[in-house]
Image: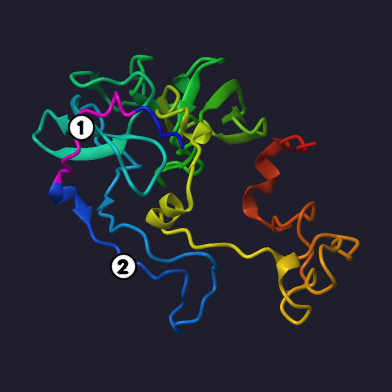
């Protein structure tokens, strides 16, 4: 069993005015029926209201704390603005207590600062990138992720995501400088079943262990091969290799290079 490095986290006490309780639905819809399996239980959590838009322009802020957020993989930072307001924001790699950040149309290229994409030079790493100007950051928000600025042309910025996909976004949208914190999160080994239950993850039963009435892989004497040409879900839907992205999604036209297939 392994865990992430919490040495950069400075406090375990949350700022209560910026937290609220979210009701746990355990994967059930408004009728009480399970629509997402293997969810339920787990420790209680308080939701931190993170500011993804960061629309306080030209007002410097000082980082007060670096904190753990149970609802996301990256760490968050509590920023105290010069006008006295406090807001949570995503913490970048290398961000420390006492650092000063600013959001401006053309801010210094310092980790944590937020500025328009058209003022960020090629080769820089950014996170919390807006897909539509003013809508708040949507791209590169999880632990260790980033988007690399590849070029600027015709009102658009070309970004190479950590998945190796390349896409275009309007260059008058905002992005924060740097790579996100907690980059070793994907190396964590859960280690035991009980720890999964703490996280609200319930057990998963293999399809091959079920009866034929319950799963396409079910039945047979002893261990049997899958018996179907393509991998399927419990409801017979093809999975594993089938494209699920909507053909008419509005942002498809901005993808210039798809992410490579995993061999």
SS at circle 2: loop
Lower sequence index among marks 1 and 2:
2
| Residue 153 drawn in magenta | no
Residue 171's spot in the image, x, y percent? 51, 30
Toward the left, the furthest residue is 84
Residue at (15, 38) in percent of width and height = 86
Q: CA distance from mark 1 to mark 2?
A: 27 Å
Q: Which residue is mark 2?
A: 23
Q: Position of residue 19 (x, y in %)?
A: 21, 52
Q: Is residue 195 above or below residue 75?
A: below
Q: Position of residue 263 (x, y in %)?
A: 80, 36
Which quadrant of the figure has residue 222? bottom right
Q: Nearer the viewer, residue 235 or 53?
A: 235
Main structural element of the magenta stretch: helix, strand or loop? loop
Residue depicted at 75% across the width and 34% down the height: 260
Residue 81 in sight: yes
Q: Which residue is at the front of the view, 73 or 203?
A: 203
Relative to the observer, which residue lies in front, 148 or 195?
A: 195
**Quick check: can you spot residue 117?**
no
Q: Specify the quadrant of the image occupied by residue 150.
A: top right
Q: Are marks 1 and 2 in contact (CB under 8 Å)?
A: no
Local packing at callout 2 (Cα closer than 10 Å; few below 14, some 14-19, many 20+) is: few
Q: Which residues are magenta?
A: 6-15
Q: Is residue 200 above or below residue 181?
A: below
Q: Secondary structure at mark 1?
A: strand
Left/right placement of residue 243 relative to residue 190 reads right
The residue that appears at 84% across and 62% down in the rendered structure is 226
Q: Is residue 166 left or right of residue 157?
A: right
Q: Is residue 219 above or below residue 104?
A: below
Residue denoted by label 1: 79
Q: How is the image coloured?
A: rainbow
Residue occupying the point 69% across, 45% down = 253
């Amino acid at each position: 069993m392994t865990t992430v490095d919490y040495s950069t986290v400075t406090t375990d006490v949350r700022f209560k005015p910026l937290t609220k309780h979210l009701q746990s639905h355990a994967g059930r819809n408004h009728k009480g029926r399970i629509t997402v399996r293997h969810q339920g239980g787990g420790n209680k959590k308080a939701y931190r209201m993170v500011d993804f838009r960061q629309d306080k322009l030209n007002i410097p802020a000082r980082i007060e704390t670096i904190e753990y957020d149970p609802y996301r993989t990256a760490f968050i930072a509590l920023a105290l603005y010069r006008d006295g307001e406090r807001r949570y924001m995503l913490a970048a790699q290398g961000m420390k207590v006492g650092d000063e950040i600013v959001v401006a149309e053309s801010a210094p290229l310092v980790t944590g600062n937020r500025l328009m994409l058209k003022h960020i030079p090629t080769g820089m790493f950014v996170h919390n990138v807006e897909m539509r100007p003013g809508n708040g950051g949507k791209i590169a928000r999880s632990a260790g992720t980033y988007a690399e600025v590849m070029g600027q042309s015709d009102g658009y910025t070309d970004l190479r995501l950590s998945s190796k996909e390349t896409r275009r976004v309007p260059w008058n949208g905002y992005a924060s400088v740097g790579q996100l914190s907690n980059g070793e999160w994907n190396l964590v080994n859960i280690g035991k079943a009980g720890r999964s239950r703490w996280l609200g993850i319930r057990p998963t039963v293999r399809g091959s262990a079920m009866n034929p009435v319950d799963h396409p892989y079910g039945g047979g004497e002893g261990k049997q091969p899958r018996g179907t040409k393509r991998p399927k879900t419990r409801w017979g839907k093809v999975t594993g290799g089938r494209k699920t992205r909507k053909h008419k999604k509005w942002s498809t036209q901005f993808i210039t290079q798809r992410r490579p297939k995993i061999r």
